[in-house]
Image (tube, rainbow, N blue to C red):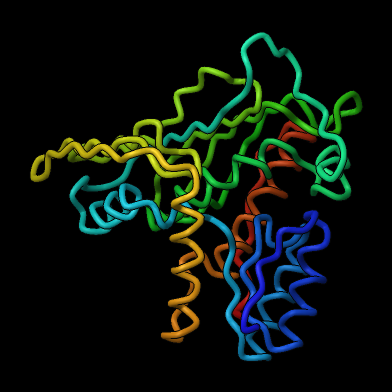
Amino acid sequence: MDAVFIATPNNRHAPHARMAAEAGKHVLTEKPMALTVDDGIDMVRTCKSNGVKLGVGFQLRCHPGHIEASRLVQQGVLGSIVLAQAQLGNGERGQLSRTIRTGLSEWWEHPEMIGGASTMIGAGVHAIDDMHFLLGQNVVEIAAITDGQNSENALESVATMSLRFDGGAIGMMACSGRLPDSKNDVVIYGSDGRIVLKDASRPSMGGELEVISETVNNNVAYEPDPLLLFKWQTEAFNRAILNDEEPAASGIDGLKIIQVTLAMIESASTGRTVKIDPLPAL
């Protein structure tokens, strides 16, 4: 065995990753990589010191539409990026509150095990990492409003966020498990055009890529497949090991999402905008 995939309860990701790395195994972990920045930093350093790869399960980085959108943004096809919007929701019609998980999934209802957030950690982190990937910019400031992180509800079922990126773009993100008819789109507006990933913010294959700009105008649809991105994610991690390359989503990428999640929790709890500090050199 050369590598492990960690899909245990969130509060066990860090210790399990550390054990695997110290045994010389490459690590692909489900998100969140860890529940604290310190634990995430320890994971990165432990994997590095033991000569193993550390990847995080953000499979939208393997979606061909998102890969193409990122390439076009980096090429400057949209000009200066002004605004990015992402929504990721699901649910059942008529269901006014989230269904309590039971059995092996019961830990999702425990703040200390899941990490102090629910729909953000379950869904929203995919949208945030996707915006990092698409824009080539990182969130540095966040203002969040949720229906949780308070004395009545420790965990949220709806979360909205206003974001500032280090490259100057502004962003908006919404996620919820109470949106059965959610328009799960990602939209990027630039000074010279826009890109829309229609019904493509879920971490599964499908949706449509629409590009409208001065130089590129295109529309591509993708056949839905609930498992294909997981397959490609695993294959990409295997290639990273064999070719000694960075994984599609690295430990550093995972650390940035821990920072954003903790900032969201703080902002929702206090009603204040929260700035994100730069990571130390790793």
Seen from the viewer's position, the closer of residues 6 and 197 is: 6
Q: Is residue 158 left or right of residue 109?
A: left
Up/down of 234 relative to 181, above or below? below
Residue 78 in picture, x, y percent from top left: 22, 45
Viewed as shown, does residue 181 lie left or right of 108? Answer: left
Q: Name which residue lies at 73% across and 34% down.
A: 268
Q: Position of residue 163 (x, y in %)?
A: 53, 41
Residue reaching furthest to the right: 151
Instruction: Give the position of the C terminus as an image quadrant.
Output: bottom right
Q: Nearer the viewer, residue 52 or 103?
A: 103
Quarter of the image that includes the N terminus: bottom right
Q: What residue is shown at x 78% (from left), y 55% (from top)?
A: 10
Q: Residue at x 11, y 44 (%)?
A: 216
Q: Is residue 202 left or right of residue 11?
A: left
Look at the picture and state if 208 lies above or below 165.
above
Q: Name the foreground residue: 132 vs 141.
A: 132
Frontmost residue, 223 versus 128: 223
- Vertical comparison of 95 with 235: above or below: above
Count how many numbered circles sit on residues in the image. Answer: 0
Indicate the position of residue 2 as horizontal and vertical percent values.
62, 84
**Can you tell which quarter of the image residue 185 is in?**
top left
Residue 154 position, x and y percent, is 86, 33
Q: Residue at x 41, y 57 (%)?
A: 62
As drawn, the residue found furthest toward the top would be 94
